Image: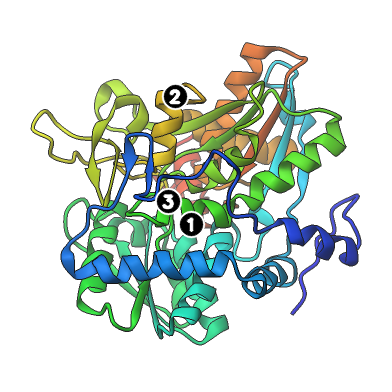
Amino acid sequence: MTINPTYPGAPPREERIRMSSEFFIPDLEGQVPSPEGYFGAYGGKFIPEALVAAVDEVAVEYDKAKADPEFARELNDLMVNYTGRPSALTEVPRFAEHAGGARIFLKREDLNHTGSHKINNVLGQALLTKRMGKTRVIAETGAGQHGVATATACALFGLECTIYMGEVDTQRQALNVARMRMLGAEVVAVKSGSRTLKDAINEAFRDWVANVDRTHYLFGTVAGPHPFPAMVRDFHRVIGVEARRQILERAGRLPDAAIACVGGGSNAIGLFHAFVPDADVRLIGCEPAGHGVETGEHAATLTAGEPGILHGSRSYVLQDEEGQITEPYSISAGLDYPGIGPEHAYLKDSGRGEYRAVTDDAAMQALRLLSRTEGIIPAIESAHALAGALEVGKELGKDALLLVNLSGRGDKDMDTAARYFGLYDNGAEGGSK
């Protein structure tokens, strides 16, 4: 199956295949973790003894894969002919009128096969699973997009697939649960704790311990123990590689800011990584403020968290005075996480990255605004970045050039949005906003 982009100015297929040789470029000089997996003070590998061999195997096999031209060729071919890369760069002038007149371009990861950026990492790790001789894949998912992408890759490669998803998230993302099951995956609703993403990750780790010999844990974000933060970033940095080239071609210069939503941080680091050496490009991550950081009902880890250890690595974590993990909250299932990838923690502390908190309502208003001004319905996760762009545009003025990662499409969120804005004919709860 071949999926070709049809946006205006898309290069011919032969040119896209040539460009694809740049899709999988594992490291930029000076932006790699230490041999122990640390970005400054953050990262590392804090795992039970039963998982050490499996995690070390992933690291060894990934190092081999990075040096293997055949691995890069196969992954690049999938990115072009299965995912449909490169994804489009779309200017949104009517939306930008509400951002102080700044020019705004969207990196359209929502147009990828399966509807989000998640497929980039999943295809890379699925190929790695085959190289390791494993026959079963497990994964966690919040909004369901990583779960759908994982189930898709497992169907493609003939791998057994089990997805762990918090019970709350299975209810608010029922459409994606159905998609995963249609693709042949077993979906396990996790009923412990807050019944959201954190708890799904906990259950996935328990499964991995029990079935480590034949199972690969296809971790979905740039958190977790080394090598996952760097490996997942490497598979996603195609986003920034493409976007940097595209905006130079379209606008004639680099953006003043690259903006992305941040939960665990994979789509954001995928965009940011190619711009880290460009000191004049601000890197702005938009965290979920929920009902407001001051209310305690949020998931703004870098805004309100403290350094700690969660899910195998050291980073910023939402925790109480006794160091216990506190329950996160966000209207967005994909951002509802009390931790953050260690590279983001490093970018924050170094001052290279900026992180601001966006409330549920600001994100939902941005979702509706993009829908009604540009005919593009974004995921609620991505809408946090759009809300951030509206703020940044007003701060910088009409001469600003902003690049926003539209990490996913909003089909999965229509029930939530319809209830929030009172769009159902029967007056479903939520009311008109």
Q: What number is the disc on residue 231?
A: 1
Residue under the point 73% across and 48% down: 242
Residue occupying the point 56% across, 57% down: 235
Q: Residue at x 80, y 42 (%)?
A: 246
Q: Nearer the viewer, residue 98 or 269?
A: 269
- The Cα–Cα distance between marks 3 and 1, rounded to whole angstroms, is 6 Å
Q: Amino acid at mark 3?
A: Pro
Element at badge 3? helix
Tell me where residue 33 appears, x and y as whole percent: 44, 45
Say if residue 433 shows up in the picture: no
CB within 8 Å, label 3 to label 1 = yes
The quarter of the picture where the N terminus appears is bottom right
Is disc 2 placed on a helix, strand or loop?
Answer: helix
**Whether residue 428 is situated above or below residue 317 in the rendered picture:** below
For marks 1 and 2 on the same chain, the one whose residue lies earlier in the sequence? 1
Q: Which residue is mark 2?
A: 350
| Kind of residue at badge 1 | Met
Q: Which residue is mark 3?
A: 229
Could you classify mark 2 by the number of other residues whose Cα lies within 10 Å: few (under 14), some (14-19), or many (20 or more)?
few
Using residue 305 as the reference point, say whether residue 58 is left or right of it.
right
Report the residue that reaches farthest toward the left.
322
Q: Which class describes the residues within 10 Å of circle 3: few (<14), some (14-19), or many (20+)?
A: many
Q: Position of residue 295 (x, y in %)?
A: 26, 24
Q: Position of residue 314 (x, y in %)?
A: 28, 42
Q: Is residue 221 above or below residue 62?
A: above
Mark 1: secondary structure: helix
